[in-house]
Structures are given as structure tokens and as C-alpha cells.
Image: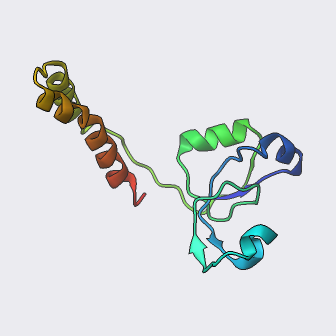
């Protein structure tokens, strides 16, 4: 979809803009301070007040953006899917293991379970 960031929102959203984008950063986008550094073309996750073209987002975020007065100017595609709690049993199992840990090793290992959950979450949604 294409999103328009109205000018009247720029002051209010300047510290934390909505709809974070991953543009290719070029030298002309840099400040004078950063232009002096060694720099090559790179992509970065950047919150900007620019209009977004072919922006991909979840419907919940889109509702938030609409509520906060961003304008949808064009919708290219819509993807429909069903969500499920396919990791729930795994997470519940690890939570129980953490509760029953008795030795230092078990406590250490059981404290790494949340990290494993986060890793699987980011790995499974990384290409979305």
C-alpha cells in the first residue's frame, strides 16, 4: 500500500515516526557530520516522515496508522492468513521446566528458554 504522511503530523511524530521503513541509505541522505565518515550504500531500519510506497504491514498496525491520521492513498495487494498458536505447547513445556529447576545448571539453562523463544519468533517472522 502507499501511505501519505500529512505535514500537520510531522511535529507531533518527529521523535518517533510511524511506519518504519528499510530504505537504501545514500550519501545525499546523510547529515554533514555523517558525510565525513567512511560510508557505502547500505540498508537500515529507519523511522522517517517520508511517504511510503509499496509499504507492507499487518492490519492491526494499519488500523493504528489510520487512527493516528496517516492516509492510505493506494492498496496494491492484500494477503489473508490465519494465525495459530503453534508454539504454545513448546513454550508451556519450557515454562514448567523453568519453574521446577533445582540446580544452578538447570536454572542457568532454564533462563535461556526465553532467548530460545525470541530466536524462534524472529527466525520465523524474519522473512515476512
Say whether residue 55 is left or right of residue 125.
Answer: right
Residue at x 40%, y 61% (from the top left corner): 127
Depth check: give the residue in front, 123 or 6. Answer: 123
Q: Is residue 122 visible?
A: yes
Where does the image place residue 68, in percent across and percent down from the top left? 74, 37
Depth check: give the residue in front, 73 or 23. Answer: 23
In the orientation shown, which residue stands out farthest toward the right? Answer: 8
Where does the image place residue 71, in percent across and percent down from the top left? 76, 49
Where does the image place residue 41, in percent across and percent down from the top left? 60, 79
- Does residue 7 lie above or below 2 as drawn? above
The way the protein has been coloured in the rendering is rainbow
Q: Is residue 31 visible?
A: no
Residue at x 72%, y 78% (from the top left corner): 27
- Does residue 16 lie above or below 4 as drawn? above
Residue at x 79%, y 46% (from the top left corner): 14
- Does residue 91 lie above or below 71 as drawn? above
Say which quadrant the N terminus sits in: bottom right
Tell how many labels. Answer: 0
Say which quadrant the C terminus sits in: bottom left
Say whether residue 97 is left or right of residue 37.
Answer: left
Residue at x 88%, y 51% (from the top left corner): 7
Depth check: give the residue in front, 117 or 59. Answer: 117
Depth check: give the residue in front, 51 or 105. Answer: 105
Q: Quadrant location of residue 87?
A: top left
Where does the image place residue 118, in percent across and percent down from the top left? 34, 42
Say whether residue 61 is left or right of residue 47.
Answer: left
Amino acid at each position: 500500500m502507499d501511505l501519505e504522511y500529512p505535514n500537520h503530523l510531522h511535529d507531533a511524530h518527529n521523535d518517533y515516526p510511524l511506519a518504519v521503513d528499510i530504505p537504501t541509505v545514500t550519501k545525499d541522505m546523510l547529515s554533514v557530520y555523517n558525510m565525513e565518515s567512511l560510508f557505502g550504500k547500505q540498508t537500515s531500519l529507519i523511522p522517517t516522515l517520508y511517504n511510503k510506497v509499496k509499504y507492507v504491514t499487518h492490519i492491526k498496525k494499519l488500523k493504528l496508522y489510520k487512527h493516528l491520521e496517516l492516509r492510505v492513498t493506494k492498496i496494491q495487494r492484500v494477503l489473508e492468513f490465519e494465525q495459530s498458536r503453534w508454539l504454545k505447547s513448546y513454550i508451556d513445556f519450557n515454562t514448567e521446566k523453568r519453574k521446577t529447576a533445582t540446580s544452578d545448571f538447570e536454572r542457568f539453562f532454564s533462563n535461556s528458554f526465553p532467548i530460545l523463544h525470541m530466536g524462534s519468533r524472529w527466525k520465523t517472522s524474519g522473512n515476512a
